[in-house]
Amino acid sequence: MSPVESDEEDLTRKQRREQARDQRRALEEAEAASAARRTRLTQLASVVVVVVVAIVVILVATGGGSSAKKVAPGSKAAGETEKVVTALVAGIPQSGNTLGNPTAPVTMQYFGDLECPICKDFTLGALPTVIKKFVRTGKLRIEYRSLETATGPEREVFRSQQVAALAAGKQDKGWNFIETFYHEQGEEKTGYVTESYLQGIAKQIPGLNLGTWTADRNDTTLVKQIEADGEAAANAGFNGTPSFLIGKSGGAMTKYEYSSLTDPTGFNEAIEKLLKA
């Protein structure tokens, strides 16, 4: 082998060694980067777990994970609800599903569902002012009528809760039941309306005979009343809650299109117009 050929061979071997070192270095760097990524992903997953646990803890602590308030009869919360409801309806004539003087010149029919959160907006929003201004003064009577929008198994729950309110109405406590239910309403479609829940509402109503109330819930005429309410709603073209009919007592009723359920102004104006007619 000539000196030139020997030098070339040595150079080639050197190049191959350098190339091999470069490849090993690249492989080591790639492995290190991969390990770093795995470490970061593990750390991120740990952070996510901590955040999720924290959220769950907060929800449980604040009641956000609960489907209903589960106000216990005799508790401070139940006492507060009772004070508000009693102050609103005490002394106003009640009969079945009706609140107000039977000879009031104007009647408003309120089609609702006790689990409807929008109905709650009205019941706790505009309605108290309407009751104080017109019902308590004998100018307006309000009929609470049931409008079923539930489907499937929820239909039985709907009827059970509405019958429970009507059964309280047989003791002239229907509006106490309705108002208490709305004040303690749980989250819709969470299955919070159980027999225990309905019993809890009934136990919060002063003067309600629980034995009589329980027996009256088996009255088939109450189910027929709910069905009649549904037919009336269909005839009026209603397909959602809350919906309203208003008119001179004993006369034709017309659909009332509300602009707000929390501001009583629109309701007040409609009632005043009928009173002046």
Image (cartoon, grey):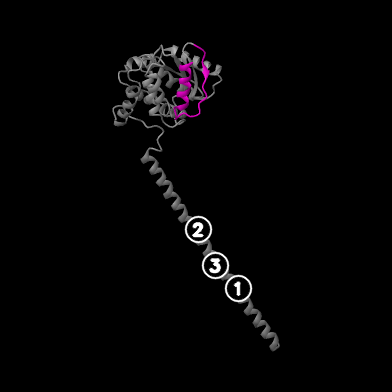
User: Decide: marks 3, 1 in contact (CB < 8 A)?
Assistant: no
Q: Is residue 271 magenta?
A: yes
Which residue is nearer to you in this view: 255 or 46?
255
Identify the residue shown where x is 60% and y is 73%.
Answer: 20
- Whether residue 70 is in magenta: the answer is no
> If you read the primary sequence from the N terminus, does the residue marked by circle 1 or circle 2 appear first?
1
Quarter of image, res 236: top right
Q: Amino acid at mark 3?
A: Glu
> Mark 2 sits on what residue?
38
User: In this image, 210 relative to 121: left or right?
Assistant: left
Looking at the rendered structure, the secondary structure element under dot 3 is helix
Residue in view at x 38 percent, y 24 percent: 179
- Number of residues whose C-alpha sits closer than 10 Å to that of mark 2, classed few (under 14), some (14–19) or many (20 or more): few
Q: CA distance from mark 3 to mark 2?
A: 14 Å
On the image, the x and y values in percent for residue 146 come to 47, 19
Q: Amino acid at mark 1?
A: Ala
What amino acid is found at the position of numbered circle 2 in the picture? Arg
What segment is highlighted magenta in the picture?
251-277
Judged left or right of residue 192, residue 234 is right
Residue at the bottom extreme of this rendering: 3
Residues 159 and 173: in front is: 173
Q: Which labelled disc corresponds to residue 29?
A: 3
Residue 20, labelled with which disc?
Answer: 1
Which mark is nearer the camera, 3 or 1?
3
Q: CA distance from mark 3 to mark 1?
A: 14 Å
Please tell me which of labels 3 and 2 falls first in the chain: 3
Give the class, few, some or many, for how many residues have Cα within 10 Å of label 3's Cα (few <14, many ≥20): few
Q: If you read the primary sequence from the N terminus, does the residue marked by circle 3 or circle 1 appear first? A: 1
Q: Quadrant of the N terminus?
A: bottom right
Instruction: Find residue 116 and report its horizontal and vertical position in percent.
Output: 46, 27
Residue 155: percent from left, percent from top: 49, 22
